[in-house]
Amino acid sequence: MLNVITGSQGFVGKALVERLQQLHLPYLATTRLTKDKKSLQVLNGICHFVDLSKPESLIPKRFFDQPFRLIHLAWCTGERKSFQANAAQVHHLAGLLDYWTGKGLSEVIALGSAEEYAEAGGKLSDRSVPHGNFSPYGWGKRTAYHLVKSWAKKSDIKTSWLRPFIIYGPGQQGNMLIPYAIEKALNNESGDFTDGKQQRDFLYIDDLIDAVANVISIPHQGFKSYQLGNGSPIEVCEILQTIHLFGHCRSEWNYGAIPRRPGEPVEQYADIRRTKKELKWRPKIDFEEGINLTLQWARKVRLCKAS
């Protein structure tokens, strides 16, 4: 079956494309049309430019009416704080499901987020109920979850909602916690952080991709949702101190310089017991190894840019 990946040029998308290529699984890597086509990274697969506001553009006409698996990763994370932008992402997903039902769409895999639980804390299972105020991004993902679940029950098509908690690893860039801290460490710069006493669940990118590969290989009908994480919380300051140490940073970091978000839970981590049992999956990379691998990648990128 053809694997059609939206958001193939994102952090998770690039890692998934590489894995599918290693597994010799056919794939179609879709991405938004950009001015710089040379920056696209596709490994021996087909790259297709798509406008998700036009669902009929998802795949080339030569693939019409052939069975395909939609792996939906596309989401405008650069606009996480905009309800309108996140509503548009939900609208795009709804358009894809509406248009392609009965036209070859045979399976759906989509990614959620721990932010779907809003301000709920503690050990969170797929049955946990969100409470408190949603971030725009969390609201968008939770709305997409209900959309996909309702569609799957109506269509009876195999659908999997994977809910990773905090993903990190080689290839991640931007102002998220770990890439920001790594940039500061390698630049030997002072960084501003919260007190870091929050406890969170960090998942290395390869472990997430393992879960996607396992979902592809395990048959089921209808809707399933899976929690993805290490299954145990780690203090954010412990992650930051590991980056500071492994990154050989000599500058002091300012803990407590940034206030925590109002309503932010002290502890939030994934209950992965059912995921391990049903997907035959467990995380393999602990946070120290994961941070070390991510730092190695970041150093290589710097060397390539400098040469």
Image: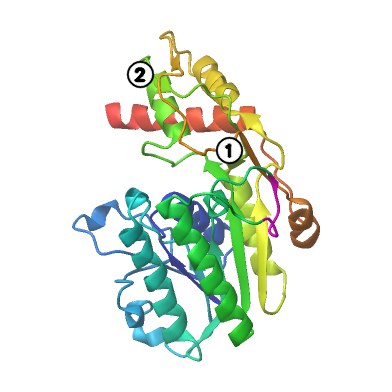
* Side (left or right) of 146 relative to 175: right
247 up-or-down from 266: above or below: above
Which residue: 35% across, 56% down? 76
32 up-or-down from 134: above or below: below
284 up-or-down from 117: above or below: above
> Which residue, as the protein is rendered here, is positioned at the far right?
277
224 up-or-down from 56: above or below: above
Magenta stretch: residue 262 in it? no
Which residue: 56% across, 29% down? 291
Spot occupied by residue 275 in the image (x, y as percentages of width and height): 74, 56
**The residue stretch that appears in magenta:** 123-128
Mark 1 or 2, nearer chain start = 2
Camera-side residue of 27 and 307: 27
Mark closer to the observer (1, 2): 1
**SS type, badge 2:** loop
* Side (left or right) of 34 relative to 203: left
> Label 1 amino acid?
Pro
* Side (left or right) of 150 relative to 89: right
Spot occupied by residue 10 in the image (x, y as percentages of width and height): 40, 53
Q: For marks 1 and 2, give the CA distance.
A: 31 Å
* Side (left or right) of 59 relative to 248: left
> Which residue, as the protein is rendered here, is positioned at the far left?
35
Which residue: 49% across, 50% down? 133
The image quarter in which residue 184 lies: top left
Spot occupied by residue 161 in the image (x, y as percentages of width and height): 60, 64
Name the residue beneath numbered marker 2: 187
The image quarter in which residue 180 lies: top left
Q: Main secondary structure of the magenta part?
A: loop
Spot occupied by residue 205 in the image (x, y as percentages of width and height): 56, 45
Magenta stretch: residue 127 in it? yes
Name the residue beneath numbered marker 1: 265
Q: Is residue 236 visible?
A: yes
